[in-house]
Image (cartoon, grey):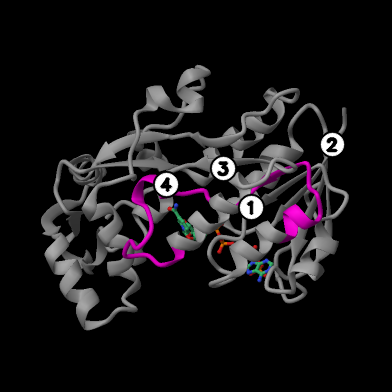
């Protein structure tokens, strides 16, 4: 059966989803929702671009979603507070047969409400809403941290800039050097999501599905950065330090995110428990990702 899919957004994750889905042998009909203001050029992909905004009214969004078999949201948190719950309400209103909300992240159920990141409470609101009904099938793909984000300066774990002239990278473990974290590259999130959607066409998994490229410790991060030629200066960012920062500035985004990993709950899972692990799909280790992507000093 040829199915019609709508991907919302074509950023770091959306583009990888589009690549994986459009190259799948079952040849689905793929549409992508972009804002009027979007500069993204999708002309090299076999997709139809439709225009819209996820901050519109629930009715407005619902009209945009109607008629697709599957809707996958790849908007990140960029729509701002309220946009994820509105999108979920619109998906239910449009009676989408299968909805994949933007929850490509940590184990929000385990982290629970009232964490340092208020946006996570909205992710739980979306889960509550989806669980409260049985008309729209839903799948959440839990990915852990995007691998690229681990090395992004806004995550405040790897600092290549402060001592670059001395070829020193400062690595700041969140909480503890042995704290574990699951990471998945955007490319593998795209690929594994397309496999989950299409391999199990008759019965795609419902509920929360865990995937992972790798599960590592902060110590592993330091070792890998060292391996590609950097000298490493090791520091620890403790829960107390992060709490101190939040007390001084409750809007400190770095501290809000850092606290989640420093507390070390809901941010890692074993590869054996993942969809890819159970289905024998090989994924890229941190070592392989670093060799391919990380800048040398
Ligand atoms: N688990 C994690 O580690 C995690 C979680 C969250 C974020 N991140 C990081 O944060 C970044 C986000 O990546 P991403 O792919 O999730 O998002 P992204 O690259 O920021 O892309 C977001 C997409 O959504 C679209 N969009 C934004 N606001 C919209 C709106 N109001 N209506 C419709 N479309 C809208 C954007 O379109 P335009 O072209 O119009 O801008 C863009 O195509 C990455 O660097 C990622 O590593 C990581």
Q: Relative to 289, is 26 above or below?
A: above
**Disc 3 designates what residue?**
140
Q: Are marks 3 and 1 in contact (CB under 8 Å)?
A: no
Label 1, ligand 1: CB separation under 8 Å: yes
Q: Is residue 95 magenta?
A: yes
Q: Secondary structure at mark 2?
A: loop
Q: Relative to 106, is 157 above or below?
A: below
Badge number at residue 3: 2
Q: Residue at x 21, y 78 (%)?
A: 247
Dot 4: within a 10 Å radius of its alpha carbon, few (fewer than 14), some, or many (20 or more) residues?
Answer: some
Q: Residue at x 41, y 67 (%)?
A: 118
Q: Nearer the viewer, mark 1 or mark 2?
A: 2
Q: Are marks 2 and 3 in contact (CB under 8 Å)?
A: no
Mark 4 or mark 1, earlier in chain: 1
In this view, the residue in front, 111 or 162, is 111
Can residue 88 be seen here? The reply is: yes
């Amino acid at each position: 059966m040829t199915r019609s899919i709508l991907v919302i957004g074509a950023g770091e994750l959306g583009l990888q989803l589009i690549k994986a889905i459009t190259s799948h042998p079952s040849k689905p009909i793929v549409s992508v929702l972009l804002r009027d203001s979007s500069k993204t050029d999708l002309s090299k992909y076999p997709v139809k671009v439709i225009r819209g905004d996820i901050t519109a009214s629930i009715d407005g969004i619902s009209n945009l979603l109607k008629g697709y078999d599957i809707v996958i949201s790849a908007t990140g948190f960029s729509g701002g507070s309220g946009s994820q719950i509105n999108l979920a309400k619109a998906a239910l209103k449009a009676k989408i047969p299968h909805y994949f909300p933007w929850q490509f992240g940590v184990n929000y159920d385990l982290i629970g409400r009232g964490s340092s990141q208020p946006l996570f409470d909205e992710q739980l609101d979306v889960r509550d809403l989806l669980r409260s009904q049985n008309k729209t099938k839903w799948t959440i793909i839990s990915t852990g941290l995007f691998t690229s984000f681990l090395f992004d300066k806004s995550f405040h774990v790897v600092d290549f800039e402060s001592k670059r002239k001395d070829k020193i990278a400062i690595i700041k473990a969140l909480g503890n050097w042995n704290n574990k974290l699951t990471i998945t590259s955007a490319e593998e999130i795209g690929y594994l999501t397309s496999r989950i959607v299409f391999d199990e066409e008759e019965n795609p998994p419902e509920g929360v599905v865990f995937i992972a490229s790798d599960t590592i410790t902060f110590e592993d991060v330091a070792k890998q950065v060292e391996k590609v030629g950097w000298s490493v200066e090791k520091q620890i960012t403790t829960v107390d330090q992060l709490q101190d920062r939040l007390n001084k500035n409750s809007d400190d985004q770095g501290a809000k995110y850092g606290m989640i990993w420093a507390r070390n709950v809901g941010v890692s899972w074993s590869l054996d428990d993942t969809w890819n692990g159970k289905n024998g799909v090989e994924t890229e280790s941190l070592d392989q990702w670093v060799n391919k992507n990380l800048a040398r000093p």
